[in-house]
Image: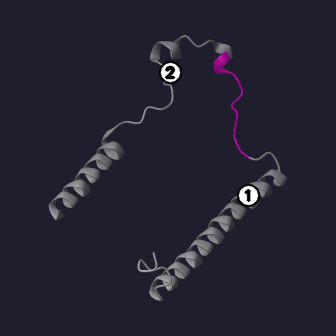
């Protein structure tokens, strides 16, 4: 049983190594060389769009959103930790016993 478990762990590590480091992620469409040369002068001279907040209100809104998300994550982890402690406490006092069934 122990050899089987080691083999499964080794197999998962090899697959994850292969997928993370050896495969080239190609999710976006690549513009070919021919298509680049066929671009007109108008398309090349178009204004670049810079992503980001336009004013201080949008910038503050982004920071507030990120802060709320992290706060929600920490609260959920805290609640989950409390639930785990309660289940451990009930297990130790043998509140849920197989003999009762």
The magenta span reads 43-52
Find numbered disc 1 in the image and state the secondary structure of the residue it sits on: helix
* 22 to 7, vertically: above or below: above
Q: Residues within 10 Å of mark 1 (few under 14, many from 20)?
A: few
- x 41%, y 80%: residue: 99
The residue that mark 2 highlights is 31
Tell us which disc is closer to us: 2 or 1. 1
Q: Secondary structure at mark 2?
A: loop
Q: Residue furthest front?
A: 101
Q: Main secondary structure of the magenta part?
A: loop
**N-terminal label among 2 and 1:** 2
Give the quarter of the image for residue 64: bottom right
Mark 1 = which residue?
65
- Residue 9 position, x and y percent, is 25, 57
Quadrant of the rendering where the C terminus is positioned: bottom left
Q: Residue at x 30, y 41 (%)?
A: 22
Q: Residue furthest bottom?
A: 93
Pick the front one: 84 or 26: 84
**Residue 99 painted magenta:** no
Give the residue displayed 41% in from the left and 77% down from the top.
98
């Amino acid at each position: 049983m122990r050899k089987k478990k080691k083999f499964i762990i080794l197999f998962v590590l090899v697959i994850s190594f292969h997928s993370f480091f050896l495969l080239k992620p190609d999710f976006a469409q690549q513009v070919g060389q021919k298509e680049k040369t066929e671009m007109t002068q108008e398309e090349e001279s178009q204004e670049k769009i810079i992503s980001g907040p336009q004013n201080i209100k949008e910038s503050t809104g982004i920071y507030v959103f990120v802060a709320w998300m992290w706060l929600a994550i920490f609260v959920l982890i805290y609640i989950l930790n409390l639930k785990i402690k309660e289940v451990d406490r009930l297990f130790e006092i043998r509140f849920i016993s197989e003999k009762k069934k």
